[in-house]
Structure formats: structure tokens, C-alpha cells
Image (cartoon, rainbow, N blue to C red):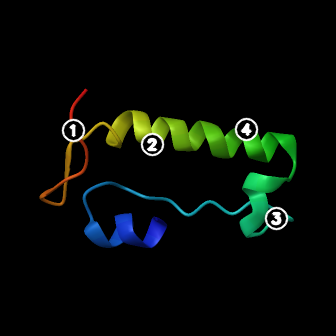
Amino acid sequence: MFATVRQAGEAPVELIRYPRKGHALSRGGEPKHIIDRLERIVAWFDRYGKQTVFNGVPMCRPL
């Protein structure tokens, strides 16, 4: 997802790396890292995920 959104260039992306953790952060890790990751995801979708068009392509139906 990171590479796709970055390549589209319509929303800013950040690559966040947590110490002592690889790709499996969603399945385990330090609680503070898990919480931070989830808060970042929610904040990103709150700001950019409500768009119904992304890079000229309809993404979902409005509720």
C-alpha cells in the first residue's frame, strides 16, 4: 500500500520503522508501537480515506 499511494502522489505517506520489529508489527510487538501504528493509520484514513475519488478513479460509493 505504501508504494502504491506514494506513486499515485495524491496523499502524503510516511514509512515508519519501529525498533526491534519487522513486517509482523500487526501480529505482535511492543504495545506502545502497536498503539502508535494504529493511531497513525486511523488519522491517515480520517484525513485522506474519505475521498471518493483517488487519482481520478472512483474508490467507493459515498455513504
If you read the primary sequence from the N terminus, does the residue marked by circle 3 or circle 1 appear first?
A: 3
Cα gap from disc 3 to disc 4, whole angstroms: 14 Å
Residue underneath mark 4: 35
Residue 45: x and y, percent? 42, 40
Q: Nearer the viewer, mark 3 or mark 1?
A: 1
Cα gap from disc 2 to disc 1, whole angstroms: 19 Å
Amino acid type, label 3 = Lys
Residue underneath mark 2: 44
If you read the primary sequence from the N terminus, does the residue marked by circle 1 or circle 4 appear first?
A: 4
**Residue density around tag 3, few if under 14, some if 14–19, many if 20 or more, within 10 Å:** few
Q: Nearer the viewer, mark 2 or mark 1?
A: 1
Residue underneath mark 3: 21
Query: Which quadrant holds residue 44?
Result: top left
Cα gap from disc 3 to disc 1, whole angstroms: 36 Å
Viewer-side residue, 39 vs 28: 28
Q: Residue at x 64, y 41 (%)?
A: 38
Residue 58: x and y, percent? 17, 51
If you read the primary sequence from the N terminus, does the residue marked by circle 2 or circle 3 appear first?
A: 3
Please give left or right for residue 21 compared with residue 13 in the image.
right
Q: Residue at x 25, y 26 (%)?
A: 63
Please give left or right for residue 37 compared with residue 7 in the image.
right
Amino acid type, label 4 = Ile
Amino acid type, label 1 = Arg
What element does badge 4 sit on? helix
